[in-house]
Amino acid sequence: MEIILANPRGFCAGVIRAIKTVRLTLEKCGAPVYVLHEIVHNRHVIHELQEQGAIFVEYLSDIPTGAVTIFSAHGVSRAVEEQAAELGLRTIDATCPLVASVHRMAEKYHKEGYDVVIIGHHDHPEVEGTAGRIDGHVHLISTVEEVKTLQVNGPTRIAYVTQTTLSQDDIAEVLQALEKQFPDIKGPISNICYATQNRQNAVKDLAGKTDLLFVVGSKNSSNSNRLKEVGTRQGIDCYLIDDAGDIDPAWLEGIRRVGVTAGASAPERLVDGVIHWLQDYGATTFREMAGKKEKVRFEPAELDEQSN
């Protein structure tokens, strides 16, 4: 059996920035440091940061007054920022810069008088954060059926942005339906994160060379789920696994070539664990695909000295 490793895979620049922000804050301020929601969607990362002194909470009201508080990479609404200030929290905004750019775009459209449509998954923290940057009503759609029932103030004054962790395939039909129903709609060429797209393209390349694909990533990771969906659309069996412990040997019966990739919030050591498991199982050859080199780097976020 042969193992073929996707490239690129794993941590993106935004995830590296968010994790580094938590670690550097713990070094500078000492434990505990509070994080609103999971800093990134990976249970292994969360557990490691908890061991170092990070405390993850779902509500700002669970954080003591004056405590250092980090907003996750997915971004937050204005209301959350205002509540944090009212509670006297010392805040650090670890929102991915690419997500922050979507925030600014949505705010710009709204200020120019457009009805703003967000293409994304309901209840996803990134979408909630983007919607919460606008003082007024926004439209959240994820299906063609929702486009058909969309009510706007004026059909010529409508604009859209998208959740960054979707795939181009996810939004293609929805966007086509929007453009058909509202020919004057404005929007970006793409809001899809460069890293998300690169990993999806790598899966498409990998799928044609393998009989089965493992996507390493947590079940609540949007971009990891999209990788699985991309592989499935290519006609191969795909499994989303947290780590090697999730592998069922029955999946490998009759398999000659196994592909391995990882979502943008999955550490490389988990990929190494899957490879070692497959080698112990009997894989005899291993190779890594050539892939697009990613050069984007972000500096860690810092404490907002104006917060109290």
Image (cartoon, grey):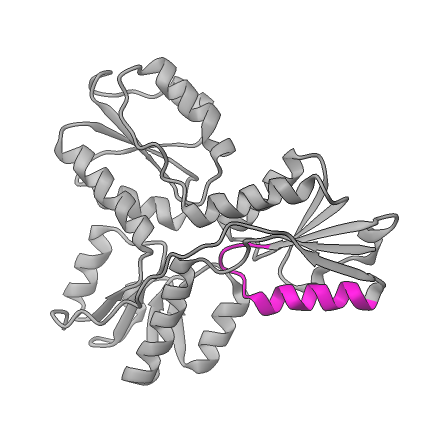
Please provide the residue range marked out in magenta: 262-280
Quick check: 41 above or below 44? above
Which image quarter: residue 33?
A: bottom left
**Along the line of sight, which residue is nearer the eye, 237 or 76?**
237
Q: Tell me what residue is drawn at x 25 percent, y 67 percent.
A: 92
x and y percentages locating residue 185 in the rendered image? 28, 21
Name the main secondary structure of what is drawn in magenta. helix
x and y percentages locating residue 100 in the rendered image? 27, 50
Quick check: 169 above or below 33? above
Q: Is residue 30 left or right of residue 2?
A: left
Residue 274: in magenta span? yes
Q: In this view, does 179 lie to the left or right of 205?
A: left
Q: Quadrant of the C terminus?
A: bottom left
Residue 287 seen in the figure: yes
Residue 143 seen in the figure: no
Q: In this view, does 75 lie to the left or right of 109?
A: right
x and y percentages locating residue 64 in the rendered image? 26, 76
Q: In which quarter of the image is the N terminus?
A: bottom right
x and y percentages locating residue 37 in the rendered image? 38, 61
